[in-house]
Image: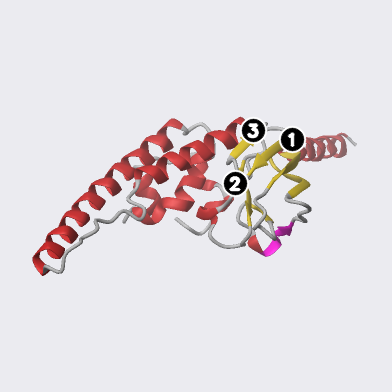
Amino acid sequence: MKRITILMSALLLAALTISAKTVKVTIDGTLSSYISKLYLIVDEDTANAQFVPIKDGKFSVTVKVDRNSFIRLYENKQWPERAFFVLIPDSKHITVNQPAGTIEGSPLSSELKMTLDMINREGPGNFHIDVFSQDKEAWAQARAQERQIRSRMEESQKQLIRRMIEVNSNNNIPAWIALCFKNLFPGGIDEMAQGKSAKWRNHPVLKGKQ
């Protein structure tokens, strides 16, 4: 009888532990008029992406997820780096405004958005040098200068990524950074993390990507 009681207590503790990790969050918001569809994707499980109805540019959805999950909102199941919003469920109610680019009710989600915006601004993006000449030498010089500048911008972007990973080492923000920017580093995620073993490296969004 004592062994049965111990076993039941252990199972109850395990159940409570599991439920404690699950949170219920309501997400609502405003979208631009040109957006006709919206997917909600948890931890990049695109096979189980949830289609979210839109009415008059508004939407509202309630989901139960792991408290460490990433919730991606986008009009396509692919391209996580292009998401309208990536949310971390650190509150029960999150409101987003896609035209304004704002997030309310979720400090971690706002922090993630700010970090991603900073990283993207630091990179070369579509930077190029225009050449208004037919001279081949002028074109060659411009392209060489363009490559040098892009290289410096890429290096600055990589340094910022490493810094943001270090700053957010106590949360899961680095996992999403790694998902979106790992291809910038020849050594992949290990190079990004500078060889450090961290809890965020075990996040589901990075499963099979290290």
Tell me residue 2's x, y (percent).
87, 34
| Placement of 119 over or under 210, stated as above or below | above
Name the element at disc 1.
Answer: strand
- For mark 3, does the 10 Å Cα neighbourhood hold few (<14), some (14 to 19), or many (20 or more) residues? some
In terms of depth relative to the viewer, which is nearer, 198 or 106? Answer: 106
| Placement of 69 over or under 39, stated as above or below | above
Residue visible at 74% across and 36% down in the picture: 17
| Location of mark 3 (residue) | 106
Tell me residue 27's x, y (percent).
73, 42
Residue visible at 77% across and 46% down in the picture: 60
| Location of mark 2 (residue) | 85
Q: Earlier in the sequence, mark 2 or mark 3?
A: 2
Task: Count numbered badges in the picture.
Answer: 3
| Location of mark 1 (residue) | 93
Residue 77, label in figure: none
Q: Gap in Å between the C-alphas at discs 1 and 2?
A: 15 Å
- Residue contact at pointers 1 and 3, CB within 8 angstroms: no
What amino acid is found at the position of numbered circle 1 in the picture? His
Residue 171 figure quarter: top right
In terms of depth relative to the viewer, which is nearer, 33 or 25? Answer: 33
Left or right, residue 68 beside residue 198: right
Tell me residue 191's x, y (percent).
34, 48
What amino acid is found at the position of numbered circle 3 in the picture? Ser
Give the colour scheme shown.
secondary structure
- If the image is split into quadrants, where does the C terminus sit? bottom left
- If the image is split into quadrants, where does the N terminus sit? top right
